[in-house]
Amino acid sequence: MVLICALLFGSTVMSIRQTSLAHSQIVRFLSQSATITGQVVTDPSQTINGSYSFIARATVISNSSISYTLRVPIRVITPRSDVTALLPGQSFRAQARIVASKEARVAALVLISSDVEVLTQASKWARGLGAIRSGLASLSGDGDAGALIPGMVLGDTSKQSAVFKASMKRSGLTHLVAVSGANFALVSAFVLWIMQFLFSTMKFRLSATAISLIAFIALVRPSPSVLRAAAMAAVLLVAQGTKRGRDSLPALGFAMGCVVAIDPWQARDAGFGLSVLATAGLLLFAPFLVEKLSTRIPKKLAQALAPPIAAIVFCSPIIVALSGYLAPMSVVANLLAAPFVAPITILGFIAALFSPFAPLISSVLIWVCRFPAAAIAAIAHWASGFSVLNLSTGRAGFIIVAVFTILLWVLKKWFKQIIALTLVIIISITWLQRWPGGDWQIANCDIGQGDSMVINLGNHRGLVIDVGPDAVAEDRCLKALGIREIPLLILSHFHADHVAGLPGAINKRTVGQLWVSVNTQPIIESTMVKSALRGVDIVTAVRGMSAGLGDLTIKVLWPTLSATSFIEMPGEGSQINNSSIATLITSPTFTIFTGGDLEPPVQQILIKDLNPVDIYKVCHHGSRYQDPGFMTALHPRLSIISVGAGNTYGHPAVQTVDALARLGSEVVRTDIDGAIAVNVRNSRLLVRKAKGRFNLIRWG
């Protein structure tokens, strides 16, 4: 009955909210331009593509003929960097284009390209909170330790690099850099401890703690995730402060109901599920673990191990559904990081409060914080280097882990036997799926929608052609291949899907020489490359060049030194694509042709220079823009298509795959087969795919 009432309540609130958004007057302006007046709700932040985004509350929308007063949430996106000066509560007006949004919690997506007119100044309260946030960020310093402190104290991850974010995620420490229930619990517990010296009764101490919690919410911004964390933290504080752990379960249910009533879209948010499950794990499973572990290990150690294990066990179905893996080393990482969390959170909070008017005191406190912060950063990098248990993402991964967790709980008297059998199965499947699986000559990394090929030069050295769009995936692939030195790096052209992964490729690796295209567009990417490889010999590769590298001969077939104009293919950026470096690589045992994103106009020019090859790295991710005569001239035995799963470009095109198959070529593609490793033995191409027959579970 309670469950039915909860479902009815939740669905009713959700329906009312969605109906109000769907029938808002703003929908009359979809796909049109309008003047919009709004009030800032969240701090503007920079997105991956360089634009700035924030949630606002639209109050007036109008055009030349009509005007409406309203009060609905909107998502604002603009390239104007001056919006970063806006603070929550300020009103603004701008000319914008209104489009439909896939984000359920907002009525529309508002795209602003013109100037944003600020109508009201921020309140003293908002300016004070903004000064605290910016003060902590500016004083925290550089490096991973400096980037970690604002994240752990205020949830500000803007200073963190992509590699560090990936290390935190893979090591299971991401929750430390998000404002979570633990942040609220630590701050509130600190205030509660201070209040014992001021007040003798618990009533006044709890009142002061509640006030501090409200102030902290205002400081870190009352976003849905923060309200969710505050609710869960309140549950844990009630359980701990009243010494009535079992009675905290109804409180947890009440907190869930309150959060969903305030923001019904939380019910569809994975973060909400993780918060609820982690809290339930700490309340239900952690005491059981402490009791069982205490019989075999010291009680203090059992109490330290139980919370991260309980949280991971309860959250594992959702974690796998989202990320596709479980990191056993995250238990160890959380255990090692635990002693450093409280000093950073508490001292960092005090430093943030002092930063607007006593920066010297803040600097001293932050200097102290940097030592534990550096320790956590080192733990994250260390733990992220260990293998993880990869499972299928989405519904399949969720069901596998959920069923296993339930069975483990129901059949807990056979706990040891189940764990032993599980380990045997995982180890057996891992052995069958190992990649690259011993000797290899050529490898193509699975780095999403992009290109990255590696040719083995021996002694942990490799010729790398393009580095893909993802620095983390590129680094992981080169680690799996054992590459520690890159004597020659060839970047076919400067599109991001071929060069953005450079930080991962050069992470703890040396580069001897870099070959680049004559076309330096896009200028942002080419500038990034030259800055990252400052001091490396950079050569502009042009037609007619050749070089020897070990037993390899590398011949450059394209581009020419002078600029060449070609017909633009629809929406493809053809001028840059057609300036890609095309190479013919020959060794005693194999030949390879690589051509970046070359399109038919250049492919036709190169036909006269081509002979059949063993391996063809298919141009432009197998797009439909291919010249049939070009593919016939190459007549490859093996065609490798580097492409991202579920990409929006339609790559690879069916006609391209069929044309290669008709030539008798074996076609492999990274979206289906994963990373590819080729070993040439007695003129035979032995292909090993990272995604084998057993793709649900693998260790790596």
Image: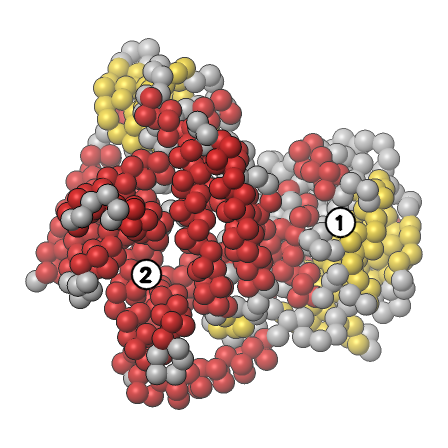
22 w.r.t. 402: above or below: above
Instruction: Give the residue at x 44% y 86%.
Output: 421
Residue 66 position within the rendered picture, expressed as x and y whole percent measured from the top left? 27, 14
Q: Is residue 368 left or right of residue 310?
A: right
Depth order, front residue of 84/34? 84
In percent of width and height, residue 495 lies at 67, 41
User: What label does residue 320 carry, if any?
Assistant: none
Which residue position is annotated with label 2? 278
- The quarter of the rendered structure image containing the N terminus is bottom left
x 40%, y 29%: residue: 130
Pointer 1 residue? 595
Marks 2 and 1, the one that precedes in the sequence = 2
The answer to whether any part of residue 642 appears in the image is no
Pick the residue in front: 454 or 341: 341
Q: Residues within 10 Å of mark 2 (few under 14, many from 20)?
A: many
The quadrant in which the C terminus is found is bottom right
- Which amino acid is tagged 2? Ala
Q: Nearer the viewer, residue 323 or 218?
A: 218
- Asked if residue 33 lies left or right of residue 257, the reply is right
Mark 1 closeness class: few <14, some 14–19, many ≥20 residues within 10 Å: many
